[in-house]
Structure formats: structure tokens, C-alpha cells
């Protein structure tokens, strides 16, 4: 995935992920205030390139909302008990000089697909909803499906490519 330095989109030839407006706004506030941005999310992988960017003066860090990382996510059930969540949040070293933003809820609405057959998108959405795959899993699955399509000299990802890619991703997660 190609990242943009302004934290607005991640994109490749098959999909674009547009960051939620709340995250973009928090990033702009943090930049203007010259403060680091801390994003509370179970989707840490989506931000890994931003966190590793040593050249950027603008620092982004992510923390999970609880120990398992799924508290507040409608796709996966949090396995933490309420006392564990409270204890976890107390242990986090809250930086007084940072801007905090929370990324929760379904990320599906922030994805836009291109060069992917409509049926393939429906299969991917079903996997997202049924298996609770994360936003970063959606990106990885599309990348695998794209590789399968390219092996078959297809320019568009078809349903069978997506189904095969999901089967590889599911095996990895089981």
C-alpha cells in the first residue's frame, strides 16, 4: 500500500482506504500544535508505516484500547473483563503533551474498491462481517487476490481470486 504523508489515504491499484474525518482532524490538530498523535485502535497494522517513518517530524503512535485490542470493535468480541480493561488503561503511560484520537467501529465504509469484480467485493465484505477480519486483513487479502489475478493474466480481481485469497488468510488466522 502506498501511504500519503498527510494521513488522508492508503491506496494501491485495487483499493483506497480513506481515513475517518476524526482521525484526519486529530492529525491536523497535532501537527498544528507540534504534538505527537496517539491513536487508540485495535487496527495498529494500518498505521505501521506511519509509526516507522523516522524522517517525519510528525510522530504517530498507536495503542490498543484494551489488552486483546478488540474493545469497542463491532466485528470482534473483546475477551477482556471490565476490571482488566480498567487496569490496562491505568497502566498506559498517557503522555500529557500528545493529542489522542480513537478509531473504533466498522472500517468497511472507508474502503473504496477498483479493478475488483462486484461479486469479489461482496465475498470480501461477507468475510469481513462473518469472520471479523480487521482492516489490515482486508488490505492483505486484496493484495493476495491481486497476485492470484496477475498470475492468471487478469486485470480485474474476480470472485474466485478473492475466495482463494480469503482461504489463505483464514488458514493463517486459525
Image (cartoon, rainbow, N blue to C red):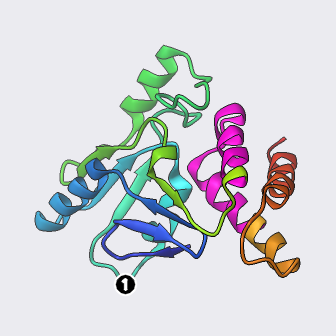
Q: What segment carries the magenta color?
A: 120-144
Which image quarter holds the C terminus? top right
For disc 1, the marked residue is: 55
Q: Is residue 100 above or below residue 85?
A: below
**Main SS of residues in magenta:** helix
Left or right position of 156 against 24: right
**Quadrant position of residue 28:** bottom left
Badge 1 marks a residue whose secondary structure is loop
**Quadrant position of residue 27:** bottom left
Residue 127 located within the stretch drawn in magenta: yes
Give how far across and how far down residue 37 sits, in percent.
Answer: 28, 57
**Quadrant position of residue 122:** top right
Give how far across and how far down residue 84 sits, in percent.
Answer: 51, 21
Please give the name of the residue rendered at 41% of the width and 22% of the height, measured from the top-left corner: 86
Name of the residue lying farthest toward the left? 33
Which image quarter holds the N terminus? bottom right
Task: Looking at the picture, tell me which residue is in the foreground, 47 or 164.
Answer: 164
Give how far across and how far down residue 29 sits, in percent.
Answer: 15, 58
Name of the residue lying farthest toward the top? 82
Please give the name of the residue rendered at 57% of the width and 50% of the height, measured from the top-left corner: 135
Left or right position of 33 against 51: left
Left or right position of 85 against 171: left
Task: Looking at the picture, tell me which residue is in the foreground, 124 or 115.
Answer: 115
Q: Is residue 139 above or below residue 67?
A: below
Total number of numbered discs in the rendering: 1
Give how far across and how far down residue 64 sits, in percent.
Answer: 48, 42
Please give the name of the residue rendered at 49% of the width and 38% of the height, measured from the top-left corner: 106
Residue 41 located within the stretch drawn in magenta: no
Query: How busy is the neighbourhood of tag 1: few (under 14 within 10 Å), some, or many (20 plus)?
Result: few
Amino acid at each position: 500500500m502506498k501511504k500519503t504523508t498527510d494521513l488522508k489515504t492508503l491506496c494501491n491499484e485495487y483499493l483506497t482506504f480513506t481515513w475517518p474525518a476524526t482521525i484526519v482532524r486529530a492529525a491536523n490538530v497535532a501537527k498544528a500544535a507540534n504534538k505527537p498523535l496517539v491513536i487508540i485502535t485495535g487496527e495498529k497494522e494500518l498505521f505501521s508505516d506511519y509509526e516507522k517513518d523516522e524522517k517525519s517530524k510528525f510522530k504517530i503512535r498507536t495503542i490498543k484500547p484494551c489488552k486483546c485490542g478488540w474493545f469497542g470493535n463491532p466485528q470482534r468480541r473483546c475477551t477482556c473483563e471490565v476490571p482488566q480493561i480498567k487496569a490496562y488503561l491505568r497502566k498506559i503511560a498517557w503522555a500529557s503533551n500528545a493529542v489522542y484520537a480513537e478509531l473504533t467501529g466498522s472500517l468497511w465504509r472507508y474502503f473504496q474498491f477498483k479493478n475488483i469484480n462486484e461479486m469479489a467485493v461482496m465475498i470480501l465484505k461477507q468475510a469481513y462481517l462473518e469472520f471479523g477480519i480487521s482492516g489490515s486483513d482486508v488490505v492483505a487479502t486484496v493484495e493476495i487476490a491481486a497476485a492470484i489475478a496477475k498470475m492468471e493474466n487478469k486485470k480485474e480481481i474476480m470472485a474466485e481470486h478473492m475466495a482463494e485469497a480469503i482461504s489463505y488468510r483464514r488458514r493463517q488466522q486459525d
